[in-house]
Image (cartoon, helix red, strand yellow):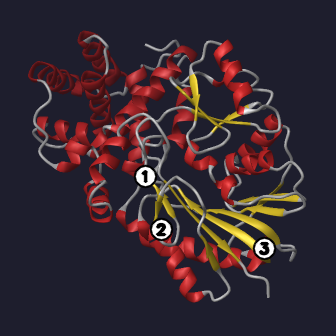
Amino acid sequence: MSQLGQPLRAVAARVMQSVENGQSLSQCLPHAMGDVADNERPPLQALCYGTCRWFHRLDGELQARLNKPLRKSNRVVHHLMLVALFQLRFSQQATYAILNETVEACRALDKPHLTGLVNGVLRAAEREGEPPLADEAGRFSHPLWMLEKLRHNWPHDWQAILETNNTQAPMTLRVNALRFSRDDYLQLLSDAGIDAKATLFAPHGIQLTAPVPVDLLPWFSEGAVSVQDEAAQLCTTLMDLAPGQRVLDACAAPGGKTCAILESCGELEEVVAIDESADRLPRVQENLERLDLMATLKQADAADIDQWWDRKPFDRILLDVPCSATGVIRRHPDIKLLRRESDIVPLASIQLGLLESMWQVLAPGGRLVYATCSVFPQENHRIIRRFLKQQDNAALVEPDVLWGRDMETGRQMLPVPESHDGFFYAVLEKPEP
């Protein structure tokens, strides 16, 4: 029982119900943290992330154990049992504690009439062990549409992608090059007893052997490092940044790439960071302040250039478009519950529209880097192919890099266990007239 009177599993069940209703973990989990004691916040996060990660596998088992689905008004108890099943299958916690505390959580959710059902289902699950998984959605713990789309797009890699998605991503840092060299910061980590190594491709990246709270990282609050996946860090290596350039980060929140741009070249004329979300822009400002960096922030729809553009063109543009986020599922396992197959076509339309708008604000001789954290070609190299067919003053640049797969109109990185996320990059230049 939490010191605040809310059983941990009851809070987790409510979070899971919010996710099922369309809220991301990043939206609903921070609010839920206020319902538990400080020392229970990490376990709550682990419960919610783990249950999302294995949702389709756990849900398949639970549905097989229920004679009939629970009423909609009792749906939160379904999620409560999923949380308990996650612990039974994937945690080291004592079984009696899981069962007893889940029954208590059921009462706390004002569902005392279902305690017998909860107790019976979980005791059977403990006694009988995990049943054979009936379908691929359960076996790979992904929605069937996503599984089939991955199999179609990546016939030789789809199983590896699914398996990687079900692992926990490593904690990766980006060293602030304005403050420290990577080697110097690796030494600071070693002195602090934190095991780490340099990333393979990102020049300022460091991967930790095991995650640690950021307040244990040397000089974190003073802006020495940021937490950012290696694949996301690579954007700056493609931008060919130089002093005096005016740079646009077109979909900036939460600001990791904006800060990476500023760290990569200390004498840029201006960096403008745009995001449509008023709720997310303060995160960009917080990151800038911690790192002692400055950018011009604007709340706007980047595609609506009349709303925000001052008619002064940009030498460099980073266009990290809204996407399905299927390359970062291991960091955001709720994507499996939130994303729908019907989302992909509208997203592709938004992506192409943003690219067309950004091309208008790019200076002749300028460079645009198109990025997604998706592994679906429909959002990636096919978008670039469509754009190049309709845009006669755009030239594709083939970067000389050792990472990713050449897709002819960009490079695709697939998620790798204990390494980088899935990302796509394409580099375009506007020729001088």
Q: Residues within 10 Å of mark 2 (few under 14, many from 20)?
A: many
Rendered image: mark on residue 307: 3
Identify whether 292 is placed above or below 375. above
Disc 1 residue type?
Answer: Leu
Q: Comparing marks 1 and 3, which lies closer to the viewer?
A: 1
Residue depicted at x 17% and y 37%: 61
User: In 3D space, how far apart are the residues under numbered discs 1 and 3 (Cα atoms)?
Assistant: 36 Å
State the residue position of label 1.
Answer: 414
Between residues 327 and 264, which one lies in front from this camera angle?
A: 264
Q: Percent position (x, y) of residue 125? A: 15, 25
Left or right of 390? Residue 221 is right
Left or right of 29? Residue 136 is left
Between residues 383 and 334, which one lies in front from this camera angle?
A: 383
Labelled pair 2, 1 in contact (Cβ < 8 Å): no
Disc 2 residue type?
Answer: Glu
SS for dot 2: helix
**Which quadrant is the C terminus positioned in?**
bottom right
User: In 3D space, how far apart are the residues under numbered discs 2 and 1 (Cα atoms)?
Assistant: 14 Å
Residue depicted at x 85% and y 38%: 292
Disc 3 residue type?
Answer: Gln
Q: Residues within 10 Å of mark 3 (few under 14, many from 20)?
A: few
Identify whether 244 is placed above or below 181. below
Q: Comparing marks 2 and 3, which lies closer to the viewer?
A: 2
State the residue position of label 2.
Answer: 379
